[in-house]
Amino acid sequence: MTRVFKHYVPNAVLLLGLLDFVLLLLAAEAGWRVRAWQIDMAVDSIATRIPQLLSFALPLEIAMVAVGAYGVHAFESWRFATARLLVAVSLGIIFLSLVFFLLPGITFWRSNLFFGMVFAIVGLVVVRFAIGSVIRGDALRRRILVLGAGRRALKLAELAARPRASFKIVGNVAMGEPTTAITGAIGRDAIDNLSDHVLALDATEVVLAIEERRNSLPLRDLLRVKTTGVGVMDYSTFLERETGRIDLDSVNPSWLIFSDGFSSGRMLSSMFKRAFDVAVSLLLLAFAVPVILVTALAIKLESAGPAFYRQRRVGLYNQPFDILKLRSMRQDAEVAGTAVWAAEDDPRITRIGKWIRKVRIDELPQCWSVLKGEMSFVGPRPERPQFVADLERDLPFYAERHMVKPGITGWAQINYPYGASTEDARHKLEYDLYYAKNYTPFLDLLILLQTLRVVLWPEGAR
């Protein structure tokens, strides 16, 4: 993993992204040269076309990030990867056609797009076939020695067995746990020198997965390991890095207090986020009003009741506010105002409601809440007061998610399917805490881009 603006990115993704970007530049150049050859035009030095090459490569690279071309499934299935690449390049070319029309000075001719697109698709697929074994192999994985052989060590072993795990466990050292869950773990007493053992295994990192650290932490050994240049990391921090969430089963208040992060409230970050919210909400509302009005008319024609409804939610610092949404359920969906979790294939959802939920049109009126400052585009989803009261009682650290302004989309929304239970809320809270802890404008941009993937393939919509 490589940390980019406080967010961890797998080394395989960085390598593939860099190769893709270089390939897109080459595809643009090849397309230009083919078109120049067709019209018998002299070709100048490539240095004269750098802005044009970048104008081709950057939007396509961004489109690939947005549609999930670097997601887990793209590394597991060639068919899945090829399909996402085709969608990304198609969306990128549509966008480029508009850009090339508006800004002809920094772009290629639109006639070059076809050739560039063909070269790009062929090259991207070939690259994935050519280096697929490297990406899926052990060459880019960190070698981990785990101190511990109990329940926590077993969880790390399960993570290492994932198809796109960024680490490989090269050994486990049992630290006197009453029960051992890892077969083949070596007892600490059987190792004369822990630092020599680490070097012999060629480990690049040692992870503490000790069940009970009180009076069992080998400080002298860890200091010697650290001074040899091998990284040492505690269990909770390691899980945060590898999973993109904060594991509620292992964290405690002191870990949250002394770890870095939680900077979303800083003045510069808040000013940037607010300026972005105002600008984009005004732009979206200008384009979305016709869509909202047509959808509202369809809702009215299908079922009795108002097309819009207001619902009380809990926002920043536990302050209540009302969000405006397009109605997707029957008017009598909740009897006596009692909050009810939405269920899969919920019979209360209308036919129009099922469609607008899948493409997230019902969320568009919330741009007004963003413009007013009650919400942001990116942040934890605001919950209803009835649910919040129960969840704060049942889930540790749930109140901390309200230290960040709620959003229309968020880290939990793009990483976890729609939740409709306390257990689902627990999993989403782990992602929300990660977002609150590691917020940067870069993470916001990444979430906004990948929201397109959720809209195009709405597996979790209800």
Image (spheres, rainbow, N blue to C red):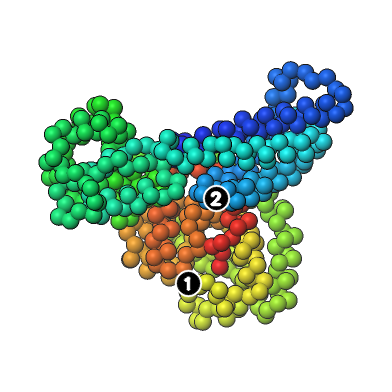
Residue 266 visible in rendering: no
Instruction: Specify few, some or many for label 2: CA neighbours under 10 Å numbering under 14, 14-19, or 20 or more.
Output: few
Instruction: Say few, some or many: other residues with alpha carbon within 10 Å of mark 1 (under 14 / 14 to 19 / 20 or more).
Output: few
Identify the residue at horizontal 75%, vertical 31% (top origin). 31
Seen from the viewer's position, the closer of residues 380 and 117 is 117
* Secondary element type, mark 1: loop
Q: Which mark is residue 332?
A: none
Image coords of residue 117 (percent x, y): 72, 39
Q: Amino acid at mark 1?
A: Trp
Residue 404, x across and y down, in percent: 45, 51
Q: Secondary structure at mark 2?
A: loop
Q: Which residue is mark 1?
A: 341
Q: Estimate the x, y position of residue 56 in percent, counting from the top left.
A: 70, 34
* Quarter the N terminus occupies: top left
In the image, residue 449 above or below residue 108? below
Task: Give the residue displayed 50% in from the left and 43% down from the top.
Answer: 443
Q: Which mark is residue 77?
A: 2
Observer-side mark, 1 or 2, equals: 2
Q: Is residue 243 left or right of residue 19?
A: left
Q: Earlier in the sequence, mark 1 or mark 2?
A: 2
Instruction: State the image coordinates of residue 204 (x, y, percent, origin top left).
Output: 32, 33
Q: Residue at x 63, y 71 (%)?
A: 353
Mark 2: amino acid: Ser
Does the residue at mark 1 contact the one at mark 2 (Cβ under 8 Å)?
A: no
Up the image or down, 52 lies above or below 396; here it is above
Q: Total number of numbered labels?
A: 2
Distance, label 1 to label 2, CA atoms, is 34 Å
Is 114 positioned to the left or the right of 80 in the image? right
Relative vertical location of residue 58 with respect to residue 421 in this rendering, above or below: above
198 left or right, relative to 397: left
